[in-house]
Amino acid sequence: MQLIESRIYPFLCAQTLAERQARDSLFRIGENEFLLHMTSEAGTEEDRLVWLDSRAALLWINQTTDEYGTNWK
């Protein structure tokens, strides 16, 4: 497993309307296999794992700052 990219960005918590930090990390698992690990600031204890193919990983890498966090659904 190889870390390709990691980003930290702010977001608004829907429950408290407080600004929090989120971290997304993209890992290459194998040929045409990527894993996106998404986590928010400590205290919320919510992590998500999303399996991506090469096309989806490339789209994620090329997101603008306004699009950060759009994979969190």
Image (tube, grey):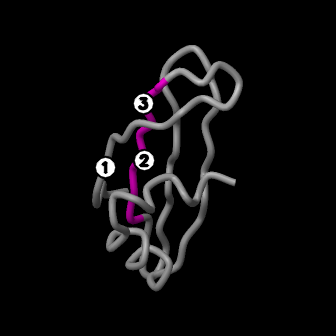
Which of the 4 image quarters holds residue 46?
top right
Seen at 42% across and 69% down, the residue is: 60
Q: Earlier in the sequence, mark 3 or mark 1?
A: 1
Task: Provide the secondary structure element on which disc 2 rests.
Answer: strand
Seen at 47% across and 26% down, the residue is: 20
The magenta stretch is 19-28
Report the magenta stretch's main SS. Answer: strand
**Residue type at the position of mark 3:** Gln
Seen at 39% across and 57% down, the residue is: 26
**Residue type at the position of mark 1:** Ser
Q: Quadrant of the C terminus?
A: bottom right
Q: Which residue is mark 2?
A: 24
Q: Are marks 2 and 3 in contact (CB under 8 Å)?
A: no
Q: Earlier in the sequence, mark 1 or mark 2?
A: 1
Task: Provide the secondary structure element on which disc 1 rests.
Answer: strand
Query: Residue reaching furthest bottom?
Result: 55
Residue 47 in the image: state x and y as whole percent. 61, 37
Q: CA distance from mark 2 to mark 3?
A: 10 Å
